[in-house]
Amino acid sequence: MRALRPSTRIRAGDFGFGFRPLPTFLATAIDRHPSQRTDRERVNRLPSLFAAMREPSALAELRARIAELEGSAARQAAIPFGVDALDRYLPGGGLAAGALHEVAGSVDLADDASATIFLAGILARVDGPVFWCLRWRDLFAPALHLAGLHPDRVIHVEAGSDTNVLLAMEECLRHRGLAGVVGEITKYSTTASKRLQLAAEASGVTAFVFRRASRAEATVEGTAALTRWRISAAPSEALSIPSLGRPRWQVALERVRGGEPRQWIVEGCDAQGRIGLSAALVDRPVATEDRQAAA
């Protein structure tokens, strides 16, 4: 069992897009149809129109709105891991904020648990509340706390099905100021991933899709996620005394826009959500067949 905390149900609403009015200087420029103006009026209005268009604030507002409509609004700062061996292979030096990312474990419960703590460590290093959307209550809050994500910051959304989890994620992503939104699902469509990516871009909140019990050899449908990660448990470092060493994970970056797939052996999250670079680091390109599977 992974859960000990009361959950909250959210009814996800319809996701829509709104268009704001054009900037004031453009509205005033077309207040009269050209056919109604004399030649002198048109000539006299040109200097004031050009002056208005030269205003940096007006141009910046127009560019921002065009970028928003094109779905390419400027992203927020990245969320770095604090480990150069990982961050230098990620565009922007870390996980892009205000975007969609995918994380998977495997059918092995230990791998899914490792992926859960990997996610908790990322969110522990970002300020704000966290919405964790899942099908049923099996999230173990004390384990998240050990990775730096205090239970008071986490709002559990018990949705009951993959479809409802996706609806809940979209609803949660409408609210700015969150540390992130996590959705635990088994599979979802390319269209659903695009909706989540657009919702994350609009609010600036980072979204994580956690594929539960995901088989490494399973065919993965195309996705709008910027990165795809697979986390699996690895043997801890042998100690000179009878004791348990710090957990180790094999972290595979299976897909990243603008980069190459890679994998590492890292040490699990500490109490501040930070991972460590293991002495047994594996830093190499993923095999060709793995790269093709992740494409």
Image (tube, rainbow, N blue to C red):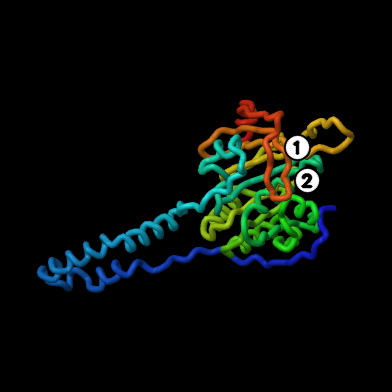
Q: Which mark is residue 248?
A: 1
Circle 2 — which element?
A: helix
Q: How far from the left and from the top, in percent, is residue 294?
A: 62, 35
Dot 1 amino acid type: Arg
For the residue pair 182 and 185, the one nearer the viewer reads as 182
Circle 1 — which element?
A: strand
For the residue pair 123 and 227, the one nearer the viewer reads as 123
Seen at 61% across and 28% down, the residue is 285
Q: Is residue 100 left or right of residue 37?
A: right
Q: How far from the left and from the top, in percent, is residue 245?
A: 81, 37
Seen at 44% across and 65% down, the residue is 19
Does residue 230 appear in the picture of this structure?
A: yes
Which residue lies under the disc numbered 2? Answer: 113
Nearer the N terminus, badge 2 or badge 1? 2
Query: Disc 2 or disc 1, which is closer to the eye?
Result: 1
Q: In the picture shown, does residue 190 fall above or below 32?
A: above
